[in-house]
C-alpha cells in the first residue's frame, strides 16, 4: 500500500483546485482520474456546449443578415466538421491545461484508472492500493438512460456523444424538454437539422415559472423547433434505417420519424461502482452521497464534493464545494453550503439567468411579496441589438425589502442577473440596487427601473 496525506477521486471542478491547495500546504496528495481530465464541464458539458452555442448563434445572425443590412450572397452552409474542430480546440485547451497542472504539481501523484474504496481509508486503482486519512470524492455524474420501450438496439446519443457529432442530423429527436435538451435542440435547429423535442410534462423546463416556459416555447417554435409537450408514452423503434419516436397516445401525431435520437432526461451520480459500501459511506435513494453543511460524509475523514453530493448540479457549485472544504480544513474559516444562493443559467439564445426563488416558490411560501417585470422589447439595448425575445422579472420581500429571486430571460440575461445575485449576497435591501446608476445602454440599466415599479405579487399573474 502507498500512503498519502490525502486522496482525491475525480478531476472535475472541485478536485484539481483542492489538489493544488492541499499539495501547496505540504500534504502528499494522490489524484485519481479514470477518463478525461477536467470532467464533465470541460469535456462533455459546459465548455463544448457553450462553444457550439456560439457557432449556432453566429449561423443564426448570418441568416438574419437582411435584418441588419447585409447579405451573404448565398445560402448559409454549416460544416459540422469545422464546427466540431473549433469545439475540440477550445475543449482541448482546457482539458490539457487541467492535465498539465496536475501532472506537474509538486507533492502530488496522478493515477489513471477507476478508483474504488476497499475500506474507509483505502482505495484501489488498477493494481495499487492507496491509503490516506483524508479522502475527497469528486466523481460527478453521467446522463441517465431511461427505461424506455424499444431503446434496446437503438443507437442513441447523450450529451457526451452529442458533442462529438461531426455530421448534421437530418432530423434530431430530443427526449427531454429541459435545460440540456433545449440547448442542443435550438443549436441543431440553427445548424440546419429538423428538430423535435418531446417532453412528458405539460410545459418546458417545468422547474421554472410558467411565463418562462411559455416564452421559451414561443421563440423556439418561431425558430422551427417542433415541441411535443404532454408526451406521456414515449417509445422508440427502428424503421427502414430511421428512428421512430412514439409520442402520445391521445393527441397530436402519434409518432415522429427522425435520423438521430438524443436522450436528455437528467443525470445520475457516478457512485454505483465506487465501493462506498466497503467504506460505509451513506447514500440517498438516488445514489447521491449524503453530506453535512461542510460536505463531510457520515465517515470521518471522507468528504464528497460536486454533483455527486446532490447539493448542486453546476460547475460553480462544485467549485464552491472546493472553496468550502479548503476554507474549513486549511484556513480555519467556517464556510457552509447553506451560505450559497441558488443561481444558474440556461444557455438557449436568448439565455435564462436565474437566482433564488421562482415566483411559484414565493407564492407557495405565503409571504407578502412584490414583483416587477419588463419585456425585453422595452429594453433599449435589446431593441438596438434586434434581440427582443424574453423578459426580466424580480421578486422582493415586501417586509424585509430583500430580493427573493429573479428570472432574466433575454439577451445578456446570464450576465445582468449578477447585479441581483450580488445584492442578495450583500443582504442589502432592493432600494440600494434601485438607486444605483447603471451604464446606458445596457440590459442591466433596466434593473433599477423594474425595482422602481414593483406591484404586490398576488395582483400579477405569471
Ligand atoms: C450538457 C451539459 C451542459 C452543462 N452546462 C453547464 C453550464 O453551462 N454551467 C454549469 O455551471 N454547469 C453545466 N453543466 C454541469 C456541470 O458540467 C457539472 O455540474 C460539473 O461538471 C460537475 O463537476 P464535478 O466536479 O462534480 O464532476 P465532473 O465534472 O463530472 O467530474 C467528475 C470526474 O470524476 C471522474 N470519475 C468518476 N468516477 C471515478 C472513479 N471511480 N475513479 C476515478 N475517476 C472517476 C470522471 O471521469 C470525471 O472526470 C452541464 C452539464 C452537462 C451534461
Image: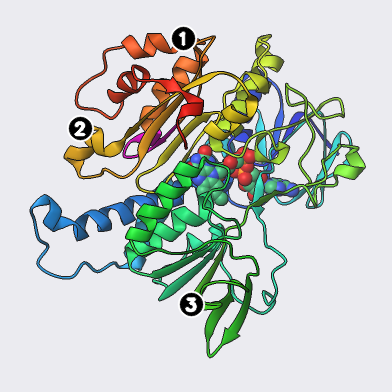
> Where are the magenta residues, as a range?
407-414
| Mark 3 residue crowding within 10 angstroms, few (<14) / some (14–19) / many (20+) | many
Residue 312, image x and y in percent?
Answer: 63, 35
Which quadrant holds residue 158? bottom right
Mark 3 or mark 2: which is in front?
A: 2
Q: Earlier in the sequence, mark 2 or mark 1?
A: 2
Residue 78, image x and y in percent?
Answer: 28, 67
Which quadrant holds residue 419? top left
Q: Nearer the viewer, residue 357 or 60?
A: 357
Q: Nearer the viewer, residue 188 or 303?
A: 188
Q: Is residue 324 above or below residue 82?
A: above
Rounded to the nearest angstrom, the CA distance separating label 3 from label 2 is 41 Å
For residue 258, the mark is: 3
Q: Nearer the viewer, residue 102 or 290?
A: 290
Determine the secondary structure under disc 3.
strand
Q: Is residue 273 left or right of residue 190?
A: right
Q: Are marks 3 and 1 in contact (CB under 8 Å)?
A: no
Pointer 1 residue:
429
Ligand 1's quadrant is: top right
Amino acid at each position: 500500500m502507498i500512503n498519502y496525506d490525502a486522496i482525491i477521486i475525480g478531476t472535475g471542478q472541485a478536485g484539481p483546485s483542492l489538489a493544488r491547495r492541499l499539495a501547496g500546504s505540504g500534504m502528499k496528495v494522490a489524484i485519481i482520474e479514470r477518463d478525461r481530465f477536467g470532467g464533465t464541464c470541460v469535456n462533455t458539458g459546459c465548455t463544448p456546449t457553450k462553444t457550439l452555442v456560439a457557432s449556432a448563434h453566429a449561423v443564426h445572425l448570418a441568416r438574419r443578415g437582411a435584418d441588419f443590412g447585409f447579405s451573404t450572397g448565398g445560402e448559409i452552409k454549416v460544416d459540422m466538421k469545422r464546427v466540431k474542430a473549433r469545439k475540440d480546440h477550445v475543449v482541448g485547451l482546457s482539458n490539457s491545461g487541467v492535465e498539465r497542472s496536475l501532472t506537474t504539481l509538486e507533492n502530488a501523484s496522478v493515477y489513471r484508472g477507476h478508483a474504488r474504496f476497499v475500506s474507509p481509508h483505502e482505495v484501489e486503482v488498477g493494481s495499487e492500493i492507496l491509503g490516506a486519512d483524508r479522502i475527497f470524492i469528486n466523481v460527478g455524474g453521467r446522463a441517465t438512460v431511461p427505461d424506455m420501450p424499444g431503446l434496446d438496439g437503438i443507437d442513441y446519443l447523450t450529451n457526451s456523444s452529442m458533442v462529438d457529432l461531426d455530421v448534421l442530423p437530418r432530423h434530431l429527436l430530443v427526449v427531454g424538454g429541459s435545460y440540456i435538451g433545449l440547448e442542443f435542440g435550438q443549436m441543431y435547429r440553427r445548424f440546419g437539422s429538423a428538430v423535435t423535442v418531446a417532453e412528458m410534462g405539460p410545459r418546458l423546463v417545468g422547474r421554472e415559472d410558467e411565463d418562462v416556459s411559455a416564452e421559451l416555447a414561443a421563440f423556439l417554435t418561431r425558430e422551427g423547433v417542433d415541441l411535443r409537450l404532454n408526451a406521456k408514452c414515449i417509445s422508440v423503434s427502428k424503421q427502414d434505417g430511421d428512428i421512430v419516436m412514439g409520442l402520445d397516445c391521445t393527441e397530436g401525431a402519434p409518432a415522429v420519424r427522425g435520423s438521430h435520437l438524443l436522450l436528455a432526461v437528467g443525470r445520475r451520480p457516478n457512485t454505483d461502482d465506487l465501493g462506498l459500501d466497503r467504506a460505509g459511506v451513506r447514500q440517498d435513494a438516488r445514489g447521491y452521497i449524503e453530506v453535512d453543511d461542510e460536505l463531510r460524509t457520515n465517515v470521518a475523514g471522507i468528504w464528497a464534493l460536486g454533483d455527486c453530493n446532490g447539493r448542486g448540479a453546476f460547475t460553480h457549485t462544485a467549485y464552491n464545494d472546493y472553496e468550502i472544504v479548503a476554507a474549513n480544513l486549511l484556513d480555519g474559516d467556517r464556510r457552509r453550503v447553506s451560505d450559497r444562493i441558488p443561481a444558474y443559467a440556461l444557455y438557449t439564445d436568448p439565455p435564462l439567468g436565474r437566482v433564488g426563488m421562482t415566483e411559484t416558490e414565493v407564492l407557495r411560501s405565503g409571504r407578502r411579496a412584490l414583483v416587477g417585470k419588463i419585456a425585453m422589447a422595452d429594453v433599449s439595448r435589446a431593441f438596438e441589438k434586434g434581440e427582443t425575445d424574453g423578459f426580466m422579472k424580480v421578486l422582493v420581500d415586501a417586509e424585509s425589502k430583500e430580493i427573493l429571486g429573479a428570472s432574466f430571460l433575454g439577451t445578456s440575461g446570464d450576465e445582468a442577473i449578477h447585479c441581483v445575485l450580488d445584492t442578495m449576497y450583500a443582504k442589502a435591501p432592493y432600494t440600494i440596487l434601485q438607486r444605483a446608476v447603471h451604464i446606458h445602454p445596457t440590459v442591466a440599466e433596466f434593473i433599477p427601473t423594474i425595482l422602481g415599479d414593483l406591484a404586490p405579487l398576488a395582483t400579477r399573474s405569471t
